[in-house]
Image (spheres, grey):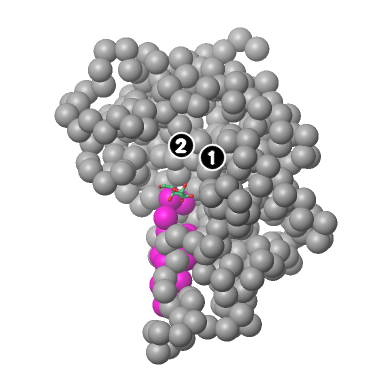
Amino acid sequence: MNKLCETYDNHFKIGAAVNLDTLSHDKELILRHFNTITVENAMKFENAHPQKNTFNFKELDIIANFAREHNIQMRGHTLVWHNQTPDWVFKNDDGNTDVTREELIKIMKDHIEKVMNRYKDVVVAWDVVNEAIEDKKNHLLRESKWLKIIGEDYIEIAYKHAMKIDPHAQLVYNDYSLIDPNKRKKSRKLIDYLRTNGVKIDAIGIQGHWNIKEPKVEKIKDALEYYKNMNLKIHITELDLSVFTENDRRLDLEKPETGMLEMQAEKYSQLFSLFREYHSVIDSVTFWGVSDYYTWLDNFPGKERSTWPLLFDKNGEPKPSFWEVINFNE
Ligand code: GLA
């Protein structure tokens, strides 16, 4: 069997999100098919920096050393986010009142500095800020504690600091729903503003938590075209195609229904054909997981069920989707 990442050598890198469990359970698959990895959770603020003076780099070190040893590049995910960030970051020691703008800027910069310095030899791209754009119509920025306490320039400060720590790294802005024209426009507004203010943003991270029916590939194409015209590199950052559409909350399937895996294969085929068309601007395509053995989607939104979203099945065997992605003629 050919290696997926080698097959795509002339196009873009092929990545997977990993954790300690999948790193060992799916080790062979990772080593064979992927040339970049993202740490699923351990680099997030609440895990890497759970208390004021406590960093926890145990899991991260193991994964980073694995990457170093096997010459795999990493994506850094993520430094500043409204989710999975512990309360201590925003609160004084009394636990009640908020820290000041200056204090929070210092906490943010320290965090960026510690994490980046430790892994910048192996991390080539950083999702410096994740999901800062508001979904509600008339608001540009999400009303996070970062925004509330620091103000609108928190994003600019974060990127400028990251740029200072590692001027060679690719700095990425990562978000979901970027194929929605309205959200896309907001991302343009944000990135234009940042660039005007001297921030280096190299790439947009388009999260791809999609499913076998939606969104339509043409819509994704519009997004790729849009960001290409903005002179940004593109990272497809969190790709998985659940066999369920968004409103399908069934919990009773013990195996995919007839036709589901074929539909998934067709969708992956269309997607990768599109990605190949845009290979000059796409830097990497990262799946949010390795095989169906473990995927966050099986516990989302709330109940446990299999969603079978990835290229390999629960035993690590290639699914029809895998063959569609690896076999192409162009
Ligand atoms: C977002 C985050 C990811 C991950 C997924 C769900 O997309 O960026 O880190 O938490 O949600 O697992």
Magenta part of the chain: 39-55
309 versus 41 height, above or below: above
The residue positioned farthest toward the top in the image shown: 329
Residue 43 among magenta residues: yes
Q: Residue visible at 45% across and 44% down?
A: 17
Q: Residue visible at 58% across and 36% down?
A: 180
Q: Position of residue 6 (x, y in %)?
A: 58, 27
What amino acid does circle 1 point to?
Ser
Q: Main secondary structure of the magenta part?
A: loop
Question: Pointer 2: residues within 10 angstroms few (<14), some, or many (20+)?
Answer: some
Q: Position of residue 168 (x, y in %)?
A: 74, 55
Q: Residue visible at 23% across and 43% down?
A: 303
Q: Residue visible at 52% across and 64% down?
A: 144
Find disc 2 in the rendering and name its residue.
209
**Does the beta carbon at disc 2 come under 8 Å from ligand 1?**
yes
230 or 38, nearer to the observer? 230
Residue 262 in sight:
yes
Find disc 1 in the rendering and name its residue.
177
* Label 2: element kind: strand
The quarter of the picture where the C terminus appears is top right
What amino acid does circle 2 point to?
His
Q: Disc 1 vs disc 2: Cβ atoms closer than 8 Å? A: no
